[in-house]
Image (tube, helix red, strand yellow):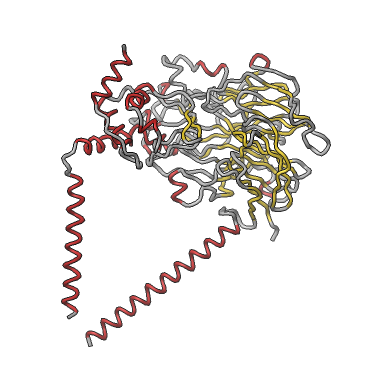
Amino acid sequence: MNKKIFFAFCLSIFATVGLLSFKLIKDDNSVRRREIVNAGLTLPGGFQVAVIADNLGSARHLVATPQGDIYVHLARTKNGKGILVLHVDGDKATLKSSFANFGGTGIAIKNGYLYASNSREVYRYKLDEKNEVINPDKPERIVTGLLDRRTHAPKAIALDNDGNLYVNIGAYSNICSEFDHNKTGCPILDSAGGIWQFKADKPDQTYGDGIRYATGLRNVVGLAWNQQDNQLFVMQHGRDELHNLFPNLYTVHQSAELPAECMFAIKKGDNAGWPYVYYDWMQHKNMLGPEYGGDSKKPADSKYINPVAAYPGHYAPDGLLFYTGNQFPEKYKNGAFIAFHGSWNRAPEPQAGYCVVFQPFKDGKPNGAWEVFADGFAGTEEQKASGHAVHRPCGLAQSPDGSLYVTDDNEGTIYKITYKKQ
Amino acid sequence: MNIKITGLFLASFILLFNVLHAQTKKQVTHPNTVGTSIARGKIVYTNVCLACHMADGGGVPNMNPPLINTTYVLGNKAALIKIVLHGFNEDVEINGKTFSNTMSAHDDLNDRQIADVLTYVRHSFDNKASAVKATEVSKVRTVAKK
């Protein structure tokens, strides 16, 4: 009798375990299948994604032509070339050619020229009627002699409709403390930590020829000209190490979430406040920085501009694109896509970011809450949390038919996101 | 019969548990100064270094160099002590990859704290190198001051 009960008990346990494991395996398989279809990414319903190129190198910003080509700028040259030309046909991109003996981040097309930057200079290449570079070996040097002190060295660029070129010159410092010992004012802001304006067509300009268009911006990688209200928008990478430097004022968690990564709508002469000020996205206000008398509660002087939108700390916004296509649903029209490269300064908390965010806009201004648009670039939760992300979003571009391109500078992958009407 | 098997199973389990427990206990109470230096060093690492070099010593691509399997960590101790004392302000190439963030000086740490954290780093993340003594840090600090 006892034996029988024991046997039945064992059998039921075996059966349960067996069924459970079967279910687990089944779930696992279905998840994996979905990942292959979506290139490992999650997207809102109706959107699809394809990997159109892989292993390109450190693919940073890119620009698309109406003829279906894309120019991809690599951070470091690969086989001696820093710019790749690919032709996109459906879900496949084929390498056509490569040129430029310099790596870099910035790349843009305006009025028949391709502009590209390295960490000291901006060049431009004349394009033919098919938007192909006429003489890849002889670019015209437009800007030269910009500071490159390694930290925040990439010079991201944008162009307006009035013949001007905007260049980010990042601050070669976290919070300027090594240059401003007596707290009398950060001296490096005269030549870094801002956006400089140059003429788009005048060769060999340097600091003296340009205008410091906006200052107090620690580092900007994602920037774009908004055609709706004819204004420059920039994404600032906020400061690091609030807790490490001020353990009595900021907890480890606060230091992971603060300060905000900020979107600023820039007008000539604006000051965004770095290093004196940071934006607290939880209190919704500009705060006086702890290096300059702040205590995590004192607000900043109102002379510094406020961001028009703010995002969690250390997400690292590297790409900004205003969507003007007709392929995506109506709500995306004229809104902003932001490529977040992902954090490193959230440790010991889990790292975060590594996603493409959508920020709704109305009449040229952010309108409503941002949402994660494409996620899953980092890989597994463990890879994401530890910061060993597999893919890291960087550049954004819009294809002629309104698809969205996203570059990844870790594995050199290019994604194409499309919307299928249902 | 059943009771006997269960009893045997329990007994072996208890035995195994005791062995494992004894082993952990042995590690904790190891009368080894290197061991205690590593334990103290881990606390310094967590407070000062982890934010940039990460919990696993893997660093951050393009920015903060890894502390794993590199001569900067495993090689000359005086050179390593100097990096902690004075910071590091140049591009560093490790296994074909470049890292460009500036490391600030940490001369506010005392000799023992620096010795402990370097001993921890040289014994962690699969690193195996000799311990660093406070007297060695003191020597480098004095030479640098002159």
Q: Is residue A372 visible?
A: yes
Q: Residue A154 location in percent, x, y?
A: 58, 29
Q: Please give left or right for residue A80 compared with residue A192 in the image.
A: right
Q: Please give left or right for residue A112 compared with residue B82 in the image.
A: right
Q: Is residue A66 above or below residue A38?
A: above
Q: Is residue A182 above or below residue B7?
A: above
Q: Which image quarter holds the N terminus of chain A?
A: bottom left
At horizontal 53% and vertical 44% (from top left) the residue drawn is A354
Q: Residue furthest bottom?
A: A1
Q: Residue furthest right?
A: A129
Total marks in image: 0
At horizontal 36% and vertical 28% (from top left) the residue drawn is A246
Front position in the image: A192 or A45? A192
Quadrant in which residue B106 is drawn = top left
Q: Residue A45 location in percent, x, y?
A: 61, 57
Q: Which image quarter holds the C terminus of chain A?
A: bottom right
At horizontal 37% and vertical 40% (from top left) the residue drawn is B55
Quadrant in which residue A195 is drawn = top right
Front position in the image: A278 or A217? A217
Q: Is residue A27 above or below residue B44?
A: below
At horizontal 67% and vertical 33% (from top left) the residue drawn is A107
Q: Is residue A253 visible?
A: no
Q: Residue furthest top?
A: B146
Q: Residue A267 location in percent, x, y?
A: 64, 26
Q: Residue A194 location in percent, x, y?
A: 58, 24
Front position in the image: A131 or A357? A131
Q: Please give left or right for residue A142 compared with residue A156 in the image.
A: right
Front position in the image: A312 or A157? A157
